Amino acid sequence: MDNFYKKPNDQKLKRGPKQKASVEAEKATEAREIRLKAHNNWPRAQESQAERDFAQLLDKLAPSIVMTPYPFLNGNTEANFHRHLGMLIDALDMLPRRPDHAFDLCFRSLDELAQELTKKGTITDALNRLGSHVCHSLSSAQSWKNSIDKLSVNMPKVSGRYLAQRLLDVLDTQNDPLKNRAVTVLGGPFCNDFFKKYRTDLPSSRSPEEAEKILATANNRAGEFLSLLMSSRAPLNIPPGQETKYAAYERLDLSNPDNVFDQAKALSVMLSLLAYNARNERVHGSSLSPFRSSKASLTTYASYYFQFHLIYAIAVGLMIESFPGCGDSIRWNANVDENMGKYHSVFGPYSRKT
């Protein structure tokens, strides 16, 4: 995941390919040295540049600015409720410095709660079903829709780019777990059109630098489309003269109401495709510690804080549904709204970068 977290810098963009490669090599060397020192000199702290940047950002703010916990009521004495509450406390203890660990701990709670509420035996099936269940089968469905809207509109661009590249990497493979989930959530025709429009096949004559630039541009465009799709709840108005631009890919035409995501599908995308895939990559060790990568930046924090807010909010909502007397959906709605406001206040400029 860390491959996408690259802090934009106008000066660096003006450098030639060789200079850029040299700078990136120096940063990679520095990051490797810091990781070794962080391990060998423990418990003495050895922070990466991204960690230092985030610490400086926090110095300007009160730690509580990053989130406000949902105020549970003292109305449920079930041991299982307090077990899940303990998971959320463990997650909060990771803040403000490690939103990635907070995300992991909240996911444990969501994993169990989603399977129990949807009566599905696997986390894959539960996450696929959860959006439809909470938006159509609960008396609190409108509160769920409101919270999903607030979460999806704040999905950072870097998360859209991450998901887009992961999808483009697997949509032409056989029996890949992410591809299978994507076909289930998005539908085969959408996946086919998305792949055809945004997949870039590079001729062998391209230099590595040219290929990297072309692929980055394609991934950015695909990510921007996914971000737009997640934040739109009504058909788009197509400017006159641009109709043919959208007609070539029928399932990507957002002027067609049938192609616009409702809240149920938006939640399925955020949970089953974005969060679940990020969690699996972390569990299986297929990515570096995100904040110790040479390409880490405050955009990295924006991405992981969004994932934490997403999973925390949904876990709390599921606890309210599962344990009567611990809270209500109206106050939960207000808490999600408050936390997304805090997220925007802290990470707004960085959430709009790729």
Image (cartoon, grey):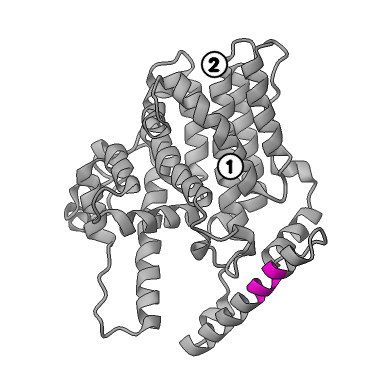
Q: From this viewpoint, which residue is outermost toward the front? A: 40
Q: Secondary structure of the magenta portion, mostly?
A: helix
Image quadrant assignment for residue 232: top left
Residue 328 horizontal side relative to residue 86, left or right:
left
Q: Which one is nearer the viewer's eye here, 73 or 334?
A: 73
Taking the image as drawn, is residue 254 in sight?
Answer: yes
The residue type indicated by label 2 comes to Ser
Task: State the residue at coordinates (69%, 20%).
Answer: 72
Please name the residue shown 37% across and 27% down the image. 129
What is the x, y in percent for residue 125? 36, 30
Write down the region rendered in magenta.
Answer: 30-36
Between marks 1 and 2 in the image, the one whose residue lies nearer the viewer: 1
> In the image, what residue type sits under mark 1?
Asp
For residue 10, what is the image quadrant?
bottom right
Where is residue 283 shown, x and y percent of the image? 52, 48
- Number of the label disc, if any, that sits on residue 322: 2
Image location of residue 104, percent across then percent down:
58, 42
The residue tagged 1 is 104
